[in-house]
Image (tube, coloured by chain):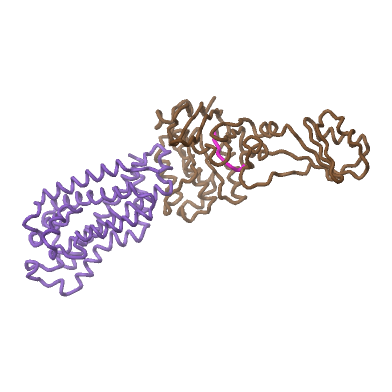
Amino acid sequence: MTALEVRNLHKRYGTHVAIDDVSFTVEEGEIFGIIGPNGAGKTTTVESIAGLRTPDSGSISVLGLDPIKDRAEVRERLGVQLQESSFPDAIKVAEALELYSSFYRDAVDWRELLDLLGLADKRNTQYKALSGGQKQRLSIALALVGNPKVAILDELTTGLDPQARRDTWSLIERVRDTGVTILLVTHFMDEAERLSDRIAVIDGGRVAAVDTPAGLIARASAVQQVRFRVREPLDRSVLTELSDVTGVEITEGRWLVTGSGQLLSSVAGALARAQVVAEDLRVDQRNLEDAFVAFTGRAPESKEPSERKAD
Amino acid sequence: MHALREMVKVETKLFLRDSATVIFGVLFPAGLLLGLGAIPALREPSPETGGLRSIDVWAPTALVFGMVMIAVQHVPAVIATYRERGILRRLSTTPAHPRNVLLAQMIVALASVVVSAALMIFLAWAVLDIAPPERPLEFVVAFVVGFAALLGLGMISAAVVRTSGAANQIGTLLFVALMFFGGAFLPRVLMPDLLREVGDFIPPGLQALTAAWSAEAGEVTATAGGQSFWLQIAIMAGIAVIASAIAAKLFRWE
């Protein structure tokens, strides 16, 4: 069943087009990631789904309901964890949960959420005294307290340390296992790759691609590269005659072979047949970050494209 | 209704944890009156005040101090903070309308000034021998309608300011202006008639409060050209309605 359906969404602020044309569907039980550069329209898209913005055209369906026309019903069933939202400094964890659970017709027992989110020993702590990770977990708990069928989590782990991020990730997986469909907006590629069943890449207000993480990577890395060094003389025709190889460059004994298909095994097989030992054999393994660059033409904020050693 | 009740409960706890507001908004009026009551000269009957003690005539001003503090400083600052920090925005994604949080704020504000007034009136009677309001019903009406007018002004401020810092600045300006007419700097009895008459139009309506508390004190501070009690109440009610409508019109949730 379809949990979320967005069709030809368009939204402008004055002359600035925030969303040009965005469409995607999210199936029930999925973790669906949205990635894209800053200003791509991610936040406006989720705000429209949450009913905080009225789109200029296009349609949105949340569990078959319209976020504007069926506002009250959508708010009962959609949990939202927003970027840049907060709670009063002096409110205690248990008070915030009790308050938010009073808003919903069919709230879950918030005490169980405290345990699920590892906040049980913080129940009497004021919001201002929580760590960044604890604040984020409280925010997630409050998005889940209404027993939603769909949860939107916007920039969930921004500002968290690496351990807190990993803890949050496993928490999200546990939440999904309880049957909640999750729409995850993030600019962390590792987060999107680790958590998402499918990902939409949004760029310039449009959907550049929708696929599984592996599918996106495969589509972006039609061209593969293998690097190595050899001590023995090697004739380049050994490699250029391979059907998977499209190019060979040699610089000071360093070989760079480009190609497609099963490039690594073809090259390794050819070198073995030529009885040549390759040293420092590396394959430029593509990840979601490379796919992101391929689809958007931009790097996802301050990270070097990684090159991993093939074992 | 369940949600509103929970909000009032939580907002009450948050209010009580804000010690500066509790001290200045709730406890200070009683403390101020007792402090001034400790000055012997202010406890002497004086012909200037028709044979009443200064403290008898001035008591309603101490009350107004707490009302103004809560309505134009505390409430707008809280709401501006809620907007600035996305608390209202977060609420608007839940089935609870953020309007309820404003309502809860106003309920808690009213409760706090009622407590403040009750405490002050009791201590004024017990310690300084100032008689409790002579016309309790009219006093309650003047108090509630006057506070509603103040709160209306506070809500306009809460509606237009972008940051809690700006809310505090506007709150301080309003506080000084309102407390001037509230007799904090120049007792109403010493004001020129014109200022006293203008004061009939300035929330929370000190003259009406004074007259309902003590008819004698009311006569001392009244002017020939002043408005009658019920006309003052009507003016305050009008201000409350108009200010609330303006605030509702201007209000931004984000």
Q: Nearer the viewer, residue B161 or A212?
A: B161
- Residue A83 on image: x %, y %: 50, 44
- Residue B105 on image: x %, y %: 32, 48
Q: Taking A86 as reference, is A161 left or right?
A: right
Quadrant of residue B123 in the image? bottom left
Q: Nearer the viewer, residue A142 or B168?
A: B168
Say if B115 sits above or below B104 in the image.
below
Say if A12 sits above or below B21 in the image.
above
Quadrant the N terminus of chain A occupies: top right
Main secondary structure type of the part rendered in magenta: strand
Judge whether residue A147 can be spotted in this image. no
Quadrant the C terminus of chain A occupies: top right
- Residue B92 on image: x %, y %: 40, 39
Quadrant of residue A217 in the image? top right
Q: Taking A18 as reference, is B235 left or right?
A: left
Tell me the residue at 32%/59% (across/down): B22
Indicate yes or no whether the magenta region holds residue A182: yes
Q: Nearer the viewer, residue A121 or A132?
A: A132
- Residue A105 on image: x %, y %: 40, 35
Indicate yes or no whether the magenta region holds residue A244: no
Outermost bottom residue: B40
Q: What range is drawn magenta here?
A: A181-188
Q: Taking A307 as reference, is B109 left or right?
A: left
Tell me the residue at 20%/72% (across/down): B38
Q: Taking A198 as reference, is B188 left or right?
A: left
Quadrant of residue B133 in the image? bottom left
Q: Which chain is purple?
A: B
- Drawing shade for chain A: brown
